[in-house]
Image: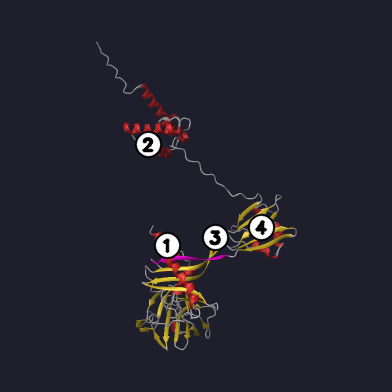
Amino acid sequence: MTTEPSKAPPLYPKTHLLAASGIAALLSLALLVFPSSDVEAKKTTLSLELESPAEQLTQDQDAADAVQATNEPAASPFAQIENSAEDTQETAQVAPAPAPAPVVEEKKAPGHKEVIVSKGDTLSTLFEKVGLPATSVHEVLASDKQAKQFSQLKHGQKLEFELSPDGQLTNLHSKVSDTESISLTKNDKGYTFNRITAKPTVRSAYVHGVINSSLSQSAARAGLSHSLTMDMASVFGYDVDFAQDIRQGDEFDVIYEQKVVNGKAIGNGPILSARFTNRGKTYTAVRYTNKQGNSSYYTADGNSMRKAFIRTPVDFARISSKFSMGRKHPILNKIRAHKGVDYAAPRGTPIKAAGDGKVLLAGRRGGYGNTVIIQHGNTYRTLYGHMQGFAKGIKTGGSVKQGQVIGYIGTTGLSTGPHLHYEFQVNGVHVDPLGQKVAMADPISKAERSRFLAQSQPLMARMDQEKTTQLASSKR
């Protein structure tokens, strides 16, 4: 007798197999509906890890607590899968994203229109953009002599139009600068032009910086403009040689005037006080205007910052050759005394007069090329060679003021590259400009000393306070 093998009992209950088949069908449907990249993202979002019974009990208890707290029925752990046939597009989201906050736009009057001037725009094209006939431009511009200023358009300029219900221009307005705006307003005779000028308020601002590269880069990083950086170099140029003395770790503090319109800084005024620490030595400067209206810079105790000569006639230049009685000439290739200092700088860099004086020569002079020679009183004389050209108004027989631009860096004469050859003579004898000691200018007069101190002391105190506050903030 043949015995039939007995059928093995099923490994899983029938209900489980049906559930598994249902899930498999849903997953297949998801693969068809969603791109592969989306499915991959859903794997990451919805992947579940096996949990221990204790963890599951804890989560179930948390869910029950949540139900009790909210008084709402708890969702089934499989609710998302069971509902996926109805909202398949939302299966990737565990929780709905919060609704974005409504954007509140500033309401404009129905007849208010704005246009920005683009490349190639004219007033006629801008009129057409807001629905006005181009022929009306002539009427507007002819209504007032100053109305033609609206035709002087700048790229990025904004024009604001106000139109009546029947589409007629009632007002045209434009801001031409931070302090000035113009407008045309319709009246019985045509249009009236009006200019509105906002007077800036003046406040003082403070900046502190530490030099870790060049002065210009460190000053810009601290928030000091290029023009104020040049002013600071000019103030301290009598004591600090910015061509060779600057070192990493040098510090500066500056209080300066700032012009403000509607809370926006639109420009800067002069430096009011400054402090510069160079190679461990600190120099201070305070701007003071005397009773006659003349302004100058003094140390905190009233001595003039202005000496008879400035240390460096070229700002931020590099010394390429120093004073030497036995230097080999780079072009002549023989030993020849170098009776001055060479400052290498880009072609066109301004050259300044080292002191007040009379111009003995502004022209060509042999190997020096374009040269300026200045006589300072009876004792001193300075020479500036290899210039690209002379500044406007510089001529033989004229006079110059200390710091005045007299020419520009070039390579005229016997020169291998753009630089200034600078010589300094005392009673006709060449001396090293870098080692020459110069006399101080007059200090604050006794009659003005108390008035000066009343201005300088608060400025010095504020720099100390601002620096302490800034350093404390940076350490938090």
Residue visible at 42% across and 67% down in the picture: 464
User: In the image, what residue type sits under mark 1?
Assistant: Thr
Q: Nearer the viewer, residue 266 or 23?
A: 266
| Membership of 323 in magenta stretch | no
In the rendered structure, find residue 172 and report the number of the disc placed on it: 4
Q: Nearer the viewer, residue 308 or 48?
A: 308
Distance CA(mark 1)–CA(mark 4): 48 Å
Distance CA(mark 2)–CA(mark 1): 52 Å
Q: Quadrant of residue 66?
A: top left
Distance CA(mark 1)–CA(mark 3): 23 Å
Q: Which residue is mark 3?
A: 263
Distance CA(mark 3)–CA(mark 4): 25 Å
Q: Earlier in the sequence, mark 3 or mark 4?
A: 4
Q: Nearer the viewer, residue 358 or 438?
A: 438
Query: Eyeballing the image, is 128 above or below 241?
Result: above
Q: Position of residue 126 (x, y in %)?
A: 64, 56
Q: Position of residue 85 (x, y in %)?
A: 46, 30
Distance CA(mark 4)–CA(mark 2): 62 Å
Q: Which residue is mark 1?
A: 469
Render colour scheme:
secondary structure
Label 2: element kind: loop
Residues rendered magenta in the picture: 200-211
Q: Which residue is mark 2?
A: 47
User: In the image, what residue type sits under mark 3?
Assistant: Gly
